[in-house]
Image (cartoon, rainbow, N blue to C red):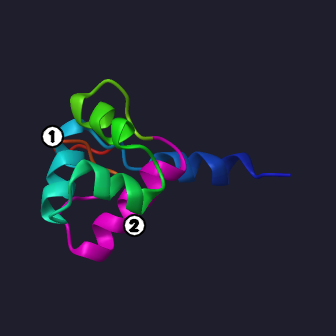
Amino acid sequence: MYNVQLMEQRKKGKRRWNEQEIRALRHHLNLTQARLAEEMGTRQQTISEWEKGIYRPRGASATLLSIIAERSGFAYKAGEKQDGSKQ
């Protein structure tokens, strides 16, 4: 059985990626939408929809973006919104 407090802590620390950040990360990595999609195991159309703001990555996709960003040295702060306030 999951501890409710642990689940809430995990939710609070998750990064909410927006379209500008996804595009900026992809440019930082010097990848096309198709290549990023291939690396993440998703469709190019999904990356396009994220970058257009139609959908937002969630779950494993959002976590994977955060891992990629951290390992590539992409400058962002997990757990903060665009304006710098805590989520």
The answer to whether residue 72 is magenta is yes
Q: Please state which of residues 2 and 32 is positioned toward the viewer in this rendering.
A: 32
Quarter of the image for residue 35 reads bottom left
Amino acid type for the residue under numbered disc 1: Asp
Residue span colored magenta: 58-78
Amino acid type for the residue under numbered disc 2: Ile
- Label 1 packing within 10 angstroms: few (<14), some (14-19), many (20+): few
Tell me what residue is drawn at x 24 percent, y 36 percent: 51
Q: Main secondary structure of the magenta part?
A: helix
Residue 21, percent across and down?
Answer: 20, 47
Q: Is residue 86 above or below residue 67?
A: above
Q: CA distance from mark 1 to mark 2?
A: 22 Å
Residue 75, percent across and down?
Answer: 16, 64
Q: Is residue 26 above or below residue 21?
A: below
Q: Is residue 59 above or below residue 68?
A: above
SS at badge 1:
loop
Residue 56, percent across and down?
Answer: 37, 34
Q: Is residue 82 above or below residue 76?
A: above
Tell me what residue is drawn at x 55 percent, y 53 percent: 10
Tell me what residue is drawn at x 59 percent, y 45 percent: 8
Residue 40, percent across and down?
Answer: 43, 58
SS at badge 2:
helix
Q: Please state which of residues 51 and 86 is positioned toward the viewer in this rendering.
A: 51
Q: Please state which of residues 41 and 76 is positioned toward the viewer in this rendering.
A: 41
The earlier-in-sequence mark between 1 and 2 is 2
Q: Which residue is label 2 attached to?
A: 67
Tell me what residue is drawn at x 65 percent, y 54 percent: 6
* The furthest residue to the right: 1
Total count of labels: 2
- Label 2 packing within 10 angstroms: few (<14), some (14-19), many (20+): few
Quarter of the image for residue 87 reads top left
Q: Which residue is label 1 attached to?
A: 83
